Amino acid sequence: MNDVSARFAPFEDLMRRDGIDALAIAAFRSAYMQLAAGGTGFIPRSAIEPVHTLPDLESIAVTSGADASLLARVAVIKLNGGLGTSMGLERAKSLIEVKRGLSFLDITARQLLSLRDRTGIAIPLLLMNSYNTDADSMAALAPYADLASDIPARFLQHRSPKVIAADLSPARWDAQPDLAWCPPGHGDLYAALVTSGLLTALREREFRYAFVSNIDNLGAVLDPVIPSFMCDRRIDFLMEVADRTAADRKGGHLARGRDGRLLLREASQCPPGEAEEFQDIALYPFFNTNSLWIDLDALAALLERHGGFLPLPLIRNEKTVDPRDPASPKVYQLETAMGAAISLFDRAAALRVPRTRFAPVKTTDDLLGIWSDAFDLTDDYRIVPHPGRGAPTTAIRLDPAHYRFIGQLAEHFPHGAPSMRACSSLVIEGDALFGRDVVLRGDVRIVVPPGEQRAIPDGTILHG
C-alpha cells in the first residue's frame, strides 16, 4: 500500500462504517487524491478563454419549437439538501414561506401539477434530499398525492468526512460528531442517481432527459423547448447561463479550456491574485444558474467510461470543523459542482436564458424582494417580476445585525413587505420598524443611528 492509499484508509473505513456506498467512497477518494497530491482546485486565467457568444432561449424558441413527445421523457430533479441555517432556521430551506403562505416546496409541487394539467403528461418530480432535510420535506410533500408516480419521489445525497488541514487526516469533533461530516457538494448528484437506482429506473422507463435545478430558484421551470433543442442539436449536457451583473460577479462563470471544451470556474477555484479579473463581468459575461439538462443515456455511458463515477474537478473549501467556533481545528471540505460535468461530456453546450429563469433566495435580502409586490405569483405558480417594473430585480441590502434571520425579518415587517414595484434599490442601515402599506420608490436608503429604533408610520412613501 503506497503512502497516499495508507492515508486514505481511515477515511474508507469511516465511510464504510457509516454505510456509505462504495461508489460514493470512490468519488471521495478521487477528490482526496487530488488534495493529497497538492491539488488546490485552482483554475488559473492562463488555462482558460472567455466565452462571449452563445445561443439564447428566445431565439431557439422561435426556430426549434417544442416536441410534446419529448416532454413525456423528461424528469424534473430539484436539489433539496440545504438547511435554512444561514437565515436562522434548523429545518429544510425549502419549507420557508415565500409567497401567499406557500413554501418553495409548495410552489415547486404546484408548478409541476399545473404543467401536468396543461399537457396531460405525468412528468415526475424527484427531490435530492440530504439526511437533514429528508423527513421534513417528505412530510410537507405528503398532501400532494397527485404527484405520485412509479418513480420514487426522492433520493438521498451522500455525505463525506471533513479533512483536517494540518495533516489531511479525518476530522473528529466529539462535542458534536456530525460536525465531522459535510455534504460533498451538488456534484454528488451523479453518484447519488446511481447508488439510489434512479438512473437505471428512469432509463428503463424510457426517460431521456433530466432537468435539474435548485429548489430555491423559483424561476427554474421546465421549458419544453429546451429538450427539443437538445435533441435537434444532439446535445448531451446543457447548462443554462445568464448575463452577469455586478451582483453576480462572485458567482461561478462559464469559460472554455485550452482543449476547446466548456468549463465552469467557481470563485473558490480562482487562484490568489486573480480575484479582480474573475469578477470582471465584461471579460466573463455569463454565470451558471445551476439549472442543467442532462441526457440520461449519455450520462450512463460517461459513468461507465469513468468506472462508475465522474472525476469532477476538486473544490477545496477551507473551514473550521465547527463553523460557529473559529478556534476549532481548520478543515478542508472536499466538494464538487454538478455544473463542472460540462467539461466531461463530448457534446456539451450552454444556453443563454433571461433573468426571469434565475430567481434564487439565498438571503433575507432576496426573500424580502420575493415577498414584495415587485414579484407576482402567476396562475401556473411561476414567480415573475411584476410587469410594470422597469428592472427585473431590486438591489436590496439589509443590515445583517437586524435583518439576517427570518424571525428578525418578520419582526421588522409585521404587516408584510412594503410596496417595491417602483423601487430600484433599497439599503437599510440600523433598526427600522415598518408600518402597514409603506411604499418605496426609486433608490431608497434608510439610516438609523446605532442603539436606536425608528418606526416608519403606516402609509409612508419613501423616495431617495
Image (cartoon, rainbow, N blue to C red):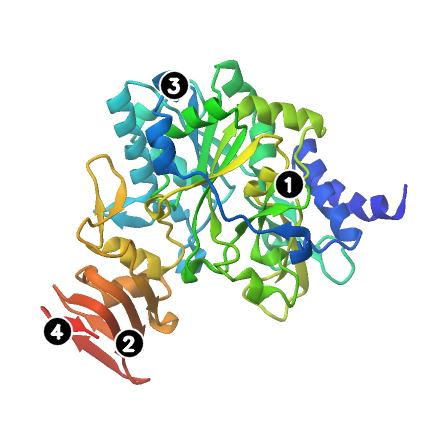
Taking 299 as reference, is 175 above or below it?
below
**Crowdedness near tag 1: few (<14), some (14–19) or many (≥20) residues, C-alpha within 10 Å:** few
**Crowdedness near tag 2: few (<14), some (14–19) or many (≥20) residues, C-alpha within 10 Å:** many
Q: Nearer the viewer, mark 3 or mark 2?
A: 3
Q: Nearer the viewer, mark 4 or mark 1?
A: 1
Q: Nearer the viewer, mark 4 or mark 3?
A: 3
Tag 3 residue: 72
Tag 2 residue: 431
Tag 3 or tag 4, which sits nearer the N-term? 3
Q: Nearer the viewer, mark 3 or mark 1?
A: 1
Q: Is residue 404 left or right of residue 254?
A: left
Q: Which of the numbered marks, if any, corresponds to residue 457?
A: 4
Q: CA distance from mark 2 to mark 1?
A: 52 Å
Q: Quadrant of the C terminus?
A: bottom left
Question: Circle 2 sits in a helix, a strand or a loop, which is it?
Answer: strand
Q: The disc labelled 3 sits on which kind of residue? A: Ala
Tag 1 or tag 4, which sits nearer the N-term? 1
Q: Nearer the viewer, mark 2 or mark 1?
A: 1
Seen at 35% across and 45% down, the residue is 354
Q: Is residue 293 left or right of residue 61?
A: right
Q: Is residue 223 visible?
A: no
Q: Which of the numbered marks, if any, corresponds to residue 260?
A: 1
Q: Nearer the viewer, residue 258 or 33?
A: 258
Q: The disc labelled 4 sits on which kind of residue? A: Pro
Q: The disc labelled 2 sits on which kind of residue? A: Asp
Question: Circle 3 sits in a helix, a strand or a loop, which is it?
Answer: loop
